[in-house]
Image (cartoon, rainbow, N blue to C red):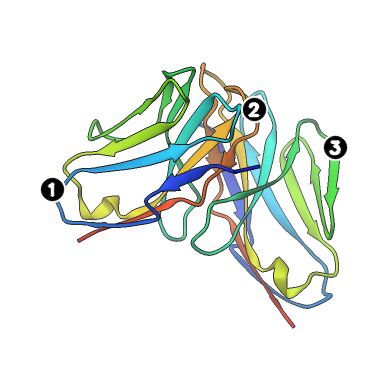
């Protein structure tokens, strides 16, 4: 069964204090790894898709990287508006559908 | 461009009642997926529809059903509501079955 584990569950940073979020996955035949940002009471907002080990993608203060077993979301000099829950998700490894299996997410709080 | 829209935004029902949630995908998207998100967890896959056909079903009881209409909008129906059905119900659309999924704002369902 496909599994996604995120750590830490919660992370509190000071504004400008860089850090990384971890997503480890167990899936045979990775068909992509997705990162989403979710604000309280809202739907997840798409950030990145990574397809192969070694791939990196950047957007503003965020950079996502992928290895064969895990992905990292690096946050450089975060601002309070970066506070949100960050989810990673992988599509199922088989079958005709394309369901996403999500981790529980990392709740990021950036204090001014 | 309009994103995924869902209605209603909030809903309060009592145990045993029935509920219908609605979703309009991004224009040009032909696939719709439904997810349930309980507090503190990541979204959990319920259904995927593509070209008006069910392409996948998650581990949910038969009380949950869905359909997709010719205009690619979708409905999620839940019968005989239980307290445990209280959650944020998310709809996601994608261009095709295996493409990036974009989420709507969700419908918050409370069952009393």
| Picture coordinates of residue A36, whole percent (x, y) | 64, 49
Badge 1 marks a residue whose secondary structure is: loop
CB under 8 Å between callouts 1 and 2? no
Relative placement, left or right, of A106 versus B82 is right
CA gap, disc 1 and disc 2:
36 Å
Query: Badge 2: few (under 14), some or many (20 or more) residues near its Cα, within 10 Å?
Result: some
Q: Which mark is residue B16?
A: 1
Relative placement, left or right, of A50 versus B55 is right
Q: Which residue is mark 2?
A: B99
Which quarter shows the N terminus of chain B? top right
| Picture coordinates of residue A62, whole percent (x, y) | 81, 56
Give me the residue at 58% from left, 24% from top. A93
Q: Who is closer to the viewer here, A53 or A110? A: A110
Relative placement, left or right, of B87 versus A17 is left
| Picture coordinates of residue A69, whole percent (x, y) | 72, 38
Q: Which residue is mark 3?
A: A55
Chain at tag 1: B
Q: Are marks 1 and 3 on the same chain?
A: no
């Amino acid at each position: 069964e496909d599994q996604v584990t995120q750590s830490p569950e919660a992370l509190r940073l000071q504004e400008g204090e860089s850090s990384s979020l971890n997503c480890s996955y167990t899936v045979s035949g990775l068909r992509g790894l997705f990162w989403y940002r979710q604000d309280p009471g809202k739907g997840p907002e798409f950030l990145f898709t990574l397809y192969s080990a070694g791939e990196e993608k950047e957007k503003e203060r965020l950079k996502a990287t992928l290895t064969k077993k895990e992905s990292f979301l690096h946050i450089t000099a975060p601002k309070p508006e970066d506070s949100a829950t960050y989810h990673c998700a992988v599509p199922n490894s088989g079958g005709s559908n394309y369901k996403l299996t999500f981790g529980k997410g990392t709740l990021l709080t950036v204090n001014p | 461009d309009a994103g995924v829209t869902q209605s209603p935004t909030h809903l309060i029902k009592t145990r045993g009642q029935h509920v219908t949630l609605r979703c309009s995908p991004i224009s040009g998207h032909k696939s719709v997926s439904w997810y349930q998100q309980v507090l503190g967890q990541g979204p959990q896959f319920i259904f995927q529809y593509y070209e008006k056909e069910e392409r996948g079903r998650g581990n949910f009881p038969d009380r949950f059903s869905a359909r997709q209409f010719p205009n690619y909008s979708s409905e999620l129906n839940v019968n005989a509501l239980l307290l445990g059905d209280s959650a944020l119900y998310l709809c996601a659309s994608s261009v095709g079955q295996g493409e990036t999924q974009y989420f709507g704002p969700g419908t918050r369902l409370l069952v009393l």
